Image (cartoon, helix red, strand yellow):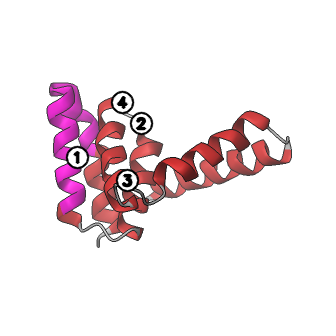
Amino acid sequence: MEKLKELTKKRKEAHSKLLSLNSKVYKAFLKMEEAAFSDGALQKKHKELIAVGISVVINCESCMQWHIEQSAQAGASQEEVLEAIEVGIEMSGGPGTVSARFALDVISEIYQ
């Protein structure tokens, strides 16, 4: 899907730009992200699935793509990702069904 490639490209460009500008806030964000998604009482896979549901609720397409990809890399099955999307739908009501359309496109691409 072309949209996924474009989101990835823009995310990588922004990441590189913020690092090249020596953004202290962005570097702190990366450390926080590493701490938040590292294994603890919850495994990384489960944390990524939580983030998938939250991404649907806040309708962040780049977040959905990133966290679905990260969930898959952490060993989540397509069924687990779908259930995380469904939790997001339930938590946000009708608007979540609109957000979930994009998330469904992403899982189709990731789990071909």
Furthest residue toward right:
21
- Residue pointed to by mark 3: 48
* Left or right, 5 with reference to 80: right
10 Å neighbourhood of mark 3: few (<14), some, or many (≥20)?
Answer: many
Instruction: Measure how far apart labels 3 and 1 are at the Cα level.
Output: 11 Å
10 Å neighbourhood of mark 4: few (<14), some, or many (≥20)?
Answer: some
Is 83 magenta? The answer is yes
- Indicate whether 52 appears above or below 111: above
10 Å neighbourhood of mark 2: few (<14), some, or many (≥20)?
Answer: some
Instruction: Measure how far apart labels 4 and 1 are at the Cα level.
Output: 12 Å
- Residue pointed to by mark 4: 58
Q: What amino acid is at disc 3?
A: Glu
As drawn, the label of residue 85 is 1
Q: Which residues are magenta?
A: 80-101
> What residue is at 16 percent from the left and 44 percent from the top?
86
Q: Quadrant of residue 68?
A: bottom left
Instruction: Measure how far apart labels 4 and 2 are at the Cα level.
Output: 6 Å
Q: Earlier in the sequence, mark 4 or mark 1?
A: 4
Secondary structure at badge 1 equals helix
Residue 3 seen by the camera: no
- Position of the C terminus, as image quadrant, is bottom left
Instruction: Measure how far apart labels 1 and 2 are at the Cα level.
Output: 13 Å
> What residue is at 25 percent from the left and 42 percent from the top?
100
